[in-house]
Amino acid sequence: MKKYLLILVFVWVFLSLVSPVDAVNKSSIPPLFKKALNESREGNFLQALKTWDEFLVSFPDDAVAISNRGNVRLALGDAEGAILDQTRAVELLPLAIDPHVNRGIAEESIGELKKAIDDYKWVLEKEPQNALALYNLGNVRGSQGDWLEAKILFNKASFASPSLVMARSSRALACYQLREFDEAEKELRLLIKKYPMFADGRAALSALLWREGFSGEAESHWAAAAGLDSRYSQADWLLNVRRWPPQPIEDLMAFLNLETI
């Protein structure tokens, strides 16, 4: 499986879970549904998959449960199974938003970008301010090398959902790639000020400061970033999982290798 979005799966799984009040009936939520939902939210995905399977034996056409099982399958690396579940949920609830977003994420994770774009665009036709669709479409545009369009989409996503911090960080990284260094630095500093434990912003600012010749401050931010999440030292992870643009990755690797930019 090509791990494009695995870092974000854990965020999107929980944001995309359909409220259990829509399951089966609104007056009585089956205990097994609650159990599966809690296991999913807690990240106990192997057990959650078993519980969703058990629930679906009794309620095979419950679109909410099927979509949630699809999210769990994606978290476990089964993108094809996730796509099958989300497609079935779409068939059962053709006007529902979440299954299209979830299917787009699964499609994107295995490089089926055209299908992912179609799903995200379908959502945005219905909900132009859907932050998840905007953000993930931005990721697709970035992977296609269109960082200007990606920046626009990340910006829209951050306005649609101000709490979606990764959208703001991705926008700053797109600015970085577009050589809008002042704008990127300003946004990253604002993010770090508000979210001091946000590793993505600190790692990106480390790369940018190194590029600008401020090695001391770069090292300070990097010490914090590496302590929060050691994966930021891995170029492959940054490119294929977190989805950074190439220039910030190149600069961060140069910084870590003590090269001159």
Image (tube, rainbow, N blue to C red):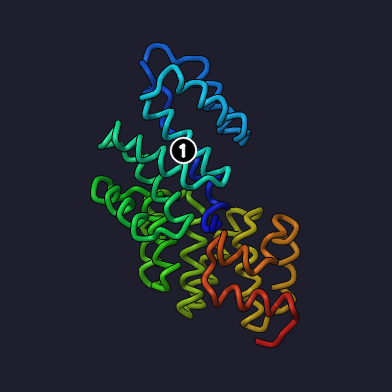
In depth, the one of 47 and 169 nearer the eye is: 47
Residue 27, image quadrant: top left
Instruction: Relative to 85, say whether 236 is above or below.
Output: below
Q: Secondary structure at mark 1?
A: helix
The C terminus sits in image quarter = bottom right
Picture residue at 62% right of the left edge, 55% below the top: 198
The N terminus sits in image quarter = bottom right
In depth, the one of 55 and 39 nearer the eye is: 55
Residue 108, image quadrant: bottom left
Picture residue at 34% right of the left edge, 55% below the top: 115
**Three-letter code for the amino acid on which mark 1 is drawn:** Gly
Question: Is residue 231 in view from this perspective?
Answer: yes
- Judged left or right of residue 114, residue 220 is right
Q: Position of residue 229 (x, y in %)?
A: 70, 56
Residue 46, image quadrant: top right
Residue located beneath label 1 in the image: 70
Residue that protrudes farthest toward the bottom in the picture: 260
- Judged left or right of residue 196, residue 108 is left
